[in-house]
Image (cartoon, grey):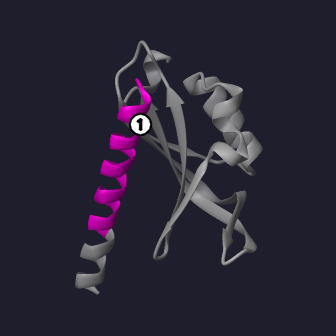
Amino acid sequence: MKNAFRDYICFTDMENIESLNQQMKESFLFKENDIKDENIEKIQLENLKFGIYFSERKNDRDRILVVKNRKNIRCGNYFINGIKKEFYSDLFFLILYKDEKNRDVIFEELIDSLLGIVKIKEVVL
């Protein structure tokens, strides 16, 4: 990974998922497989929608990077009760991990943290 892109929140202004994927591939040295639509996890927690990119890095440390786009972009489809729907988001997490076990632990920690934010938001409102 390029040293300029370590542990940060990146703000982008992409028009579509292909442009965002190209930026992820160039900036973070993602493999072509990492940025395929079917490999981007699509999550919705109440009104919070986001995509998650996963990339295995043998010579790097485990971490989560955040990418916030200026506007929502279509980043694939998802199914609810067998009905195909389009998925739009402006928030993406990049999970870099050393092995498959770490991937699952990092993913669970991210979801737990986000659920905590959603619960706090419910209480405040």
Looking at the image, the residue that sits furthest to the top is 59
Q: From the viewer's perspective, is 6 left or right of 10? A: left
Describe the element under mark 1 as helix, strand or loop: helix
Residue drawn at (67%, 37%) of the image? 35
In the picture shown, does residue 106 fall above or below 121?
above
Which image quarter is the C terminus in?
bottom left
Whether residue 54 is visible, yes or no, is: yes
Q: Position of residue 37 (x, y in %)?
A: 71, 47
Q: Position of residue 40 (x, y in %)?
A: 62, 47
In the picture shown, does residue 115 fall above or below 57?
below
Nearer the observer, 10 or 54: 54
Query: Few, some or many C-alpha atoms within 10 Å of disc 1 (few <14, some 14-19, many ≥20)?
Result: some
Assign the magenta stretch its main secondary structure.
helix
Taking the magenta stretch, the answer to whether it contains residue 49 is no
Whether residue 8 is visible, yes or no, is: no
Task: Give the quarter of the image for residue 85.
Answer: bottom right
In the image, what residue type sits under mark 1? Answer: Arg
Q: From the viewer's perspective, is 84 left or right of 89? A: right
Residue drawn at (35%, 28%) of the image? 62
Looking at the image, the residue that sits furthest to the bottom is 125
In the picture shown, does residue 8 fall above or below 93?
above
In the picture shown, does residue 82 fall above or below 27?
below
Q: Which residues are magenta?
A: 98-117
Q: Position of residue 92 (x, y in %)?
A: 53, 49
Residue drawn at (34%, 61%) of the image? 114
Q: From the viewer's perspective, is 37 left or right of 60? A: right
Nearer the observer, 108 or 11: 108
Taking the magenta stretch, the answer to whether it contains residue 113 is yes
Residue drawn at (49%, 18%) of the image? 1
Q: Position of residue 44 (x, y in %)?
A: 51, 67
Q: How many marks?
A: 1
Q: Which residue is mark 1?
A: 103
